Amino acid sequence: MTQSVPVLDFGAQTAQLIVRRIRELGIYSELLPHDVSEDEVHRLNPCGLVLSGGAASVYDEDAPQLPSWVRDTELPVLGICYGMQLQSYALGGQVSLADEREYGPATIELLEEGSIFAHTPREQPVWMSHGDRIEALPPGFRPLARTTNAPFAAAGNDARRWYGIQFHPEVVHTRFGRDILRNFLYDVCGCTGDWKAANIVHEAIERIRTQVGHGHVICALSGGVDSAVAALLMHRAVGDQLTCVFVDNGLLRQGEAEQVVATFQEHFGIQLIAIPAAEEFLSALDGVADPERKRKIIGEKFIRVFERESQRIGDVQFLAQGTLYPDVIESRAPDRAKGVTIKTHHNVGGLPDDMQLTLVEPLRYLFKDEVRATGLELGLPEDWVWRHPFPGPGLAVRVLGPVTWERLETLRQADAIFIGELRDAGLYRATQQAFAVLLPIQSVGVMGDGRTYADVVALRAITTEDYMTADWARLPEDLLARVSSRIVNEVQGVNRVVYDISSKPPSTIEWE
Ligand code: XMP
């Protein structure tokens, strides 16, 4: 069974990031509530534990405490920030309420070489964020590093294999954070680094089989990477017990519907029902200009079509969905491997209660980069794996104003030119999302000897880490010139192209 180093969550904003860093180093990790039981942790085959930071002071009345089983554990433990203070406090050290918080960049000086600081320099920049400070270490601990403000910026007890660091190794400002974590995981905990795509696939398949048994599963395929990988994993696990449903709502990009069918049905041999529903969606959207109404109409329509189709399939017990680990952590879902009956507000757009399907979430413990690695492992083509996100309401929120088939076609052509050129320039992956938007205005132009009064296309390309904030991509001028010239020449009814140079905030990524 795969090894793990779970992180106990004492409330730090960056707790999720610690889990990511551990997994990036090839070891499975999960974020668990700080009061999790020992049994629950042992079920994950742990070879060490990390105690996260947190905003509390160990002296607060309701401060989360170190569980007694952790105090007595034989596992190696790394305490980070509040986690280190808890360690000290629980093992007989002294923690004092500091007058001032130490927040931001600091430099630590190592007091000795080796252990968790092996192969890192004597002085190194770190990121601090703590209020209390440690005045005296518990018996058996010795200081490993200091700053001008903190005499015990790091400490350790080699015999127990317990270490504490006052700074945050998980953030990039701590220059050698990754090395420190690696030293702890490999040298102290003795992990072998067995969290690899092949094992991810193997474990996910086992889990799916246990949950689904001989049941039948439906899965809504959107064309995005998450639902694609979820479907492939399900198919590997249960074969023809899976039926995928793909709703062609007419709001997709050029060639997209054909590509979904070619990839999943023809290439992977998955049972796929492709529902041509463009007319149905477009007539529901007829004359609607308001973005939120468009979203609502499309969401509801999707449910109706999906519901109708699943009734036609009949005997189905499970619905597979591509929920990712960050969503699970953020919603603090108490449930772990068990299935939950879907409520009305799920990803798929909120399926009706009376469908009574049990949810299967094969990506429930994966981060996005792991979903991509899994996709590659399962043979999903590279350009699919690295696909930019595409909003559920599709091109309906990129044809500004009322949506018609003609305007969708105009946008599809312009978008295909833009994305094609971006790919040819080798810059598709240099931007995290790029697309064309058809504006609801016309402008004057001149073509040949004649005056034109025609549509305007806006190009949007952004760079971002998390899609919460974004900057506009500094695409090369000659690429933009080529795209503009091709769109105006090749797409009927367009005589002007503009490039969106707004960041988010204050703008959003999509225009509607
Ligand atoms: P905004 O425009 O809010 O977009 O900056 C952030 C990210 O979310 C995507 N997006 C959506 N995805 N349904 C979706 O599934 C939607 O209604 C929706 N609106 C925006 C957007 O493409 C970007 O990646």
Image: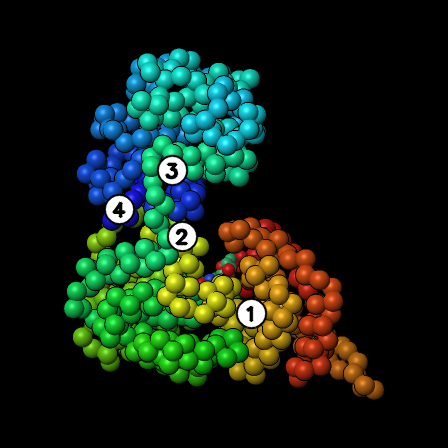
Q: Are marks 1 and 3 in contact (CB under 8 Å)?
A: no
Q: Given this view, does label 2 or label 3 mark the residue nearer the observer?
A: 3
SS class, disc 1 = loop
Mark 1 crowdedness (10 Å alpha carbons): few <14, some 14-19, many ≥20: many
SS class, disc 4 = loop
Q: Amino acid at mark 1?
A: Arg
When the figure is inspected, residue 195 is found, relative to residue 319, above or below; the finding is above
Which residue position is annotated with label 4? 334
Which residue is drawn at the image coordinates 48% and 16% (left, top)? 151
SS class, disc 2 = loop
Q: Amino acid at mark 4?
A: Pro
Q: Decide if ligand 1 comes within 8 Å of the CB at mark 4.
A: no
Q: Given this view, does label 1 or label 4 mark the residue nearer the observer?
A: 4
Q: Decide if ligand 1 comes within 8 Å of the CB at mark 2.
A: no
Which residue position is annotated with label 2? 367
In the image, farthest residue toward the bottom: 449
Which residue is drawn at the image coordinates 21% and 62% (left, top)? 209
Mark 4 crowdedness (10 Å alpha carbons): few <14, some 14-19, many ≥20: few
> Residue 226 location, x and y as percent?
40, 63
Q: Are marks 1 and 4 in contact (CB under 8 Å)?
A: no
Q: Can the viewer see residue 54?
A: no
Cα distance between the residues tagged 1 and 3: 49 Å
Which residue position is annotated with label 1? 398
Q: Dividing the picture into quarters, in which one does residue 347 lie?
A: bottom left
User: Between 423 and 469, which is closer to the camera in this rendering?
Assistant: 423
Q: Amino acid at mark 2?
A: Phe
Which residue is drawn at the image coordinates 31% and 30% (left, top)? 76
Residue 300 vs residue 313: left or right? right
